[in-house]
Amino acid sequence: MSQTILITGIGGGIGRAIFKSFLSSEYQVITSSRTEKTELDVDFNSLSEITHYQYDLTKEENVIQLFEQIKNKYNKLDVFINTIGGSLYSHKLEDFPLDEFREVLEVNLVSAFLLTKYAIQLMKNNKDNGGNIIHLVSSSAKKFSTNKAPYGIAKAGLARLIQYAAKESAIYDIRINGLSPTYVFTERHKSSIEKKVKEKDQSEEEILDHILESQLLKKPMLPEDLIPVIILLSKTKVITGQIYNCTLGEIINY
Ligand SMILES: NC(=O)c1ccc[n+]([C@@H]2O[C@H](COP(=O)([O-])OP(=O)(O)OC[C@H]3O[C@@H](n4cnc5c(N)ncnc54)[C@H](OP(=O)(O)O)[C@@H]3O)[C@@H](O)[C@H]2O)c1
């Protein structure tokens, strides 16, 4: 049987690009999103074998159901790529409503915990082949983002989750890694730049220059640019517990 890959969050800019990169690959592709298959801006027709599940994966009962369905249909999982996340809200900490703080943690950290937990439970049956798990972290885990403290806190937690999970599941030969980008230009970012142009009375070039200021390579990072690292981490048998910075040369320390 060919290898199976699960990609979560394919409704998002990065998740969709990752999904597209695995079309017509050697994998049987399993996807999950809150969005129905028919509403996703993805051509499912040209595909070999794709199974799509519609779930909100911040809820444990949904995560359990997702993995039960994967077990029943494929009886295994080889690669899991999780792209669920987002900063969602912007406030100073002193003004951050608790329900919004909790939601940011649920979307970025709790869902990653649940998905990792049940992915390990399924992957550990792979015996000699183990498996690969990849999470999307963010440079916000280390660097300050104005009015986005809960996002940075959640992503820092995710980075530690990756390390603990890698340590504990090494016994099953499951490799768990992260990819940590700075600003990735998705459709959502394009509209937020257009909004800023109107609000701040700055040109698009000025806003772009500001975003690229601290990068060595002065070009925007696109979702597709992450794919080579994703491929590496989906195939590796020797890398685990690592978080790859994709920052176009920006050096980010605590
Ligand atoms: N774009 C960037 O600049 C950037 C930089 C660093 C790190 N990242 C990280 O990369 C990942 C993808 O980012 P993106 O730019 O593609 O973001 P996006 O377009 O906003 O997509 C985020 C994904 O998260 C899922 N999600 C969001 N809120 C959710 C909720 N309440 N419940 C369940 N799922 C929820 C969505 O899944 P569905 O709609 O498919 O259900 C969506 O696919 C995220 O983890 C993000 O933190 C992004």
Image (cartoon, helix red, strand yellow):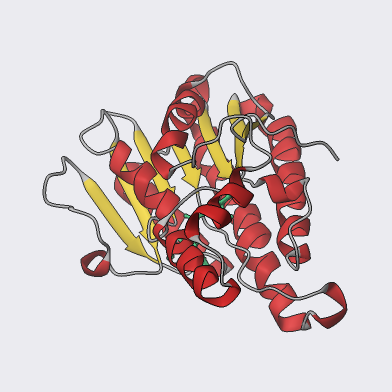
Closest to the observer: 107 or 249? 249
Say which residue appears at 54% left-offset and 69% top-offset.
196
Q: Relative to 128, is 167 above or below? A: below
Q: Relative to 172, is 70 above or below? A: below
Measured from the top left, where is residue 182 in percent x and y?
Answer: 61, 44
Say which quarter of the image contains residue 5: top left
Measured from the top left, where is residue 172 in percent x and y?
Answer: 61, 27
Say which residue appears at 59% left-offset and 28% top-offset.
175
Query: Is 108 placed left or right of 253 in the picture?
Result: left
Measured from the top left, where is residue 121 in percent x and y?
Answer: 57, 44
Q: Is residue 62 visible?
A: no
Query: Is 127 placed left or right of 114 in the picture?
Result: left
Query: Is 61 placed left or right of 168 in the picture?
Result: left
Say which residue appears at 46% left-offset and 29% top-offset.
234
Measured from the top left, where is residue 141 in percent x and y?
Answer: 74, 48
Q: Quadrant of the C terminus?
A: top right
Q: Is residue 38 visible?
A: yes
